[in-house]
Amino acid sequence: MHYQIIVIGAGAAGLSAAIYLARAGLKTLVVGTQNCSQLNSAYDIENYLGFSNGTNGKELLRNGTKQAKKFGAMIIEKNAKKITETNSKFEIRLENGTPYSSDYIIIASGMLSSFDFASSLNLELNGKLIKINNENQTSHDKVFAAGNCCTKTRQIAKDVGDGCNAAINIIKKLKNLPSYTDYGSLEDQVQEVQQAQ
Ligand SMILES: Cc1cc2nc3c(=O)[nH]c(=O)nc-3n(C[C@H](O)[C@H](O)[C@H](O)COP(=O)(O)OP(=O)(O)OC[C@H]3O[C@@H](n4cnc5c(N)ncnc54)[C@H](O)[C@@H]3O)c2cc1C
């Protein structure tokens, strides 16, 4: 089965990326299990915007998964075992042996597996993290990374933001757009403001 993007990791960064990609109409597969996300053990989250009474990681995972599926992302609760690249297409084999292919990859595997993926795709590292630029693009132009596999911050707000940034930069590439927002074009927004005045 071929997807435009495969997101490896169903935690904060991966689910955030999937929401943006799916909302942009791109064929998106997320692989990864909720119980291996760090969010699973974050019982009392008091610093994530919008939750004045706090929240917990299981709730964010549950709602994030529901939200990504609502916009059309496919989520498979299995780990990726192997990635290979042939003729500019990636093939990802899951732990049960099933192969999936894609044009782009986002690695959002948190503290797990990122070295294996980095080495099979020959990605540059920055110490123990996958090296990215300010578009969350790795040293491979079709591989992006987001969250704890490429940042030391280790805060949900940053991981969710990274997922968003990686997704938006892929959307721009695939749709050949100079800029992209998920709430209509800037021109539309300016027009709406002018009409309201
Ligand atoms: C106890 C605890 C409390 C915390 N409390 C807070 C807090 O209050 N506030 C805050 O901002 N942050 C908190 N954090 C940090 C926060 O949980 C992490 O920064 C965040 O979850 C990282 O997001 P991520 O998407 O990078 O990785 P994760 O959320 O860890 O997700 C990684 C995903 O990758 C998947 N994966 C791994 N290997 C593979 C593979 N081979 N194939 C497919 N999928 C794979 C996993 O299954 C998982 O779905 C806490 C962390 C912990 C451990």
Image (tube, rainbow, N blue to C red):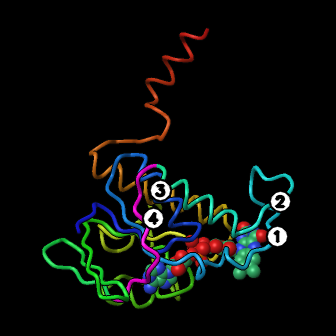
- Amino acid tagged 3: Lys
Whether 116 is drawn above or below 32: the answer is below
Q: Pointer 3: residues within 10 angstroms few (<14), some, or many (20+)? A: some
Which tag, 1 or 4, sits closer to the chain's start? 1
The answer to whether residue 74 is above or below residue 129 is: above
Location of residue 31 (image quadrant):
bottom left
Question: The N terminus is located in which quarter?
Answer: bottom left
Cα distance, mark 1 to mark 4? Answer: 28 Å
Q: Marks 1 and 2, Cα distance to the nearest angstrom?
A: 7 Å
User: Along the polypeptide, which appears first: circle 2 or circle 4?
Assistant: 2
Question: Does 72 lie within the magenta span?
Answer: yes
Please report whichever mark, 3 or 4, sits nearer to the chain's N-terminal start.
3
**Secondary structure beneath disc 4?**
loop
The magenta region covers 71-81
Q: Which residue is mark 2?
A: 54
Residue 108, label in figure:
none
1 part of magenta stretch: no
Residue 122: give x, y in percent of width and height: 31, 85
User: From mark 3 to mark 4, how far is it between C-alphas?
Assistant: 23 Å
Badge 1 amino acid = Asp
Mark pair 1, 3: CA separation = 25 Å
Q: Could you say where residue 34 lies in the image, as x and y percent from the top left?
A: 57, 75
> Which residue corresponds to the image point at 31% horizontal and 73% vertical from the top-left?
140
Q: Does the beta carbon of the residue at mark 1 sit less than 8 Å from ligand 1?
A: yes
> Can see residue 153?
no
Residue 188 left/right relative to 171: right
- Give the residue number, with chain letter if any, for mark 3: 69
Q: CA distance from mark 3 to mark 2?
A: 24 Å
